[in-house]
Image: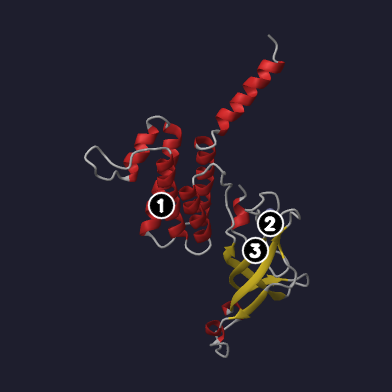
């Protein structure tokens, strides 16, 4: 997972090479001339004041992107904010460039691969987390926590105790961890981040991207059983080509 890809802003000519969630083969390419932007009234209101400078400009933007894979051709509607960023030209003089920050993309971009074997409820929680990543990171952390709940549902880990009361997520993860302690500990880490998201106004982008990476690994191992599938392939190759 290239975490930097998900933290990049962009200029008018090109957007970061975000992977296409439809085909998983192409990347987003900004459609030439599609980006339109305007400065918000609030950010320009004080432009005659002495303290006001270009760094106070806030843009709204809309743009279109398309998948680079010609056999896919998915189209993406992008919206977001932007501003002017100072840089120094070759002659050493200070200049300003328009810089844009994605806030919403439809269809939703996927920070991690979502297996076709994931049940719909888990997929919905993941899509919500991906979408919230751009606008509300604590809420995205909360959706990751919900994804953990939906994964445990899929694995038939009970939601209630013997008396019919609902089990807290900790207890459900512990129940899962009895048969898979490694991935149980990883799910518990995701739960902690979800708890933080519920009680603070800021969740670090790196922490959230790390959580997506952990979740991708757990899903590939628990739902797709990747290690088991690779071990089976290796065993078959050994049987076919190995020395007796
Ligand atoms: Zn595509």
Direction from residue 176 to residue 89 in the image, left or right: right
Quadrant the C terminus occupies? top right
Residue matched to label 1: 194
Direction from residue 123 to residue 196 in the image, left or right: left
Direction from residue 34 to residue 203 in the image, left or right: left
Disc 2/disc 1 C-alpha distance (Å): 28 Å
Which residue is at a point 29% across and 43% down the rendered structure image?
167
Which residue is at a point 49% across and 60% down the rendered structure image?
132
Labels 2 and 1: the sequence-earlier one: 2
Please tell me whether mark 2 sits on a helix, a strand or a loop: loop
Task: Rate crowding at label 1 as few (under 14), some (14 to 19) or many (20 or more) other CA atoms within 10 Å.
Answer: many
In this rendered view, identify the residue nearer to me: 191 or 97: 191
Residue matched to label 3: 76
In this rendered view, identify the residue nearer to me: 105 or 87: 105
Direction from residue 118 to residue 32 in the image, left or right: right
Task: Rate crowding at label 3 as few (under 14), some (14 to 19) or many (20 or more) other CA atoms within 10 Å.
Answer: many
Please tell me whether mark 3 sits on a helix, a strand or a loop: strand
Residue matched to label 2: 17
Q: Looking at the picture, how far across and down is residue 165, in whole percent? A: 24, 44
């Amino acid at each position: 997972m290239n975490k930097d890809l998900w933290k990049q802003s962009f200029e008018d000519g090109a957007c970061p090479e975000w992977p296409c969630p439809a085909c998983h083969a192409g990347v987003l390419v900004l459609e030439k001339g599609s980006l339109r932007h305007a400065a918000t009234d609030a950010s320009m209101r004080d432009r005659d004041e002495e303290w006001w400078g270009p760094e106070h400009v806030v843009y709204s933007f809309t743009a279109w992107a398309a998948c680079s894979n010609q056999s896919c051709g998915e189209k993406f509607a992008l919206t977001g904010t932007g501003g002017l960023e100072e840089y120094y030209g070759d002659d050493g003089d200070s200049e300003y460039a328009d810089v844009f920050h994605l806030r919403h993309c439809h269809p939703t971009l996927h920070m991690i691969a979502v297996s076709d074997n994931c049940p719909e409820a888990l997929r919905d929680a993941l899509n919500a987390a991906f979408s919230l990543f751009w606008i509300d990171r604590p809420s995205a952390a909360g959706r990751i926590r919900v994804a953990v709940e939906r994964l445990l549902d899929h694995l038939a880990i009970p939601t209630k105790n013997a008396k019919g009361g609902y089990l807290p997520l900790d207890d459900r993860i512990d129940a899962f961890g009895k048969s898979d302690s490694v991935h149980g500990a990883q799910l518990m880490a995701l739960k902690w981040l979800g708890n933080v998201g519920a009680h603070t106004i800021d969740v670090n982008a790196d922490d959230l991207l790390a959580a997506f990476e952990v979740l991708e690994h757990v899903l590939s191992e628990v739902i797709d059983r990747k290690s088991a599938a690779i071990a089976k392939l290796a065993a078959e190759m050994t049987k076919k080509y190995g020395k007796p």
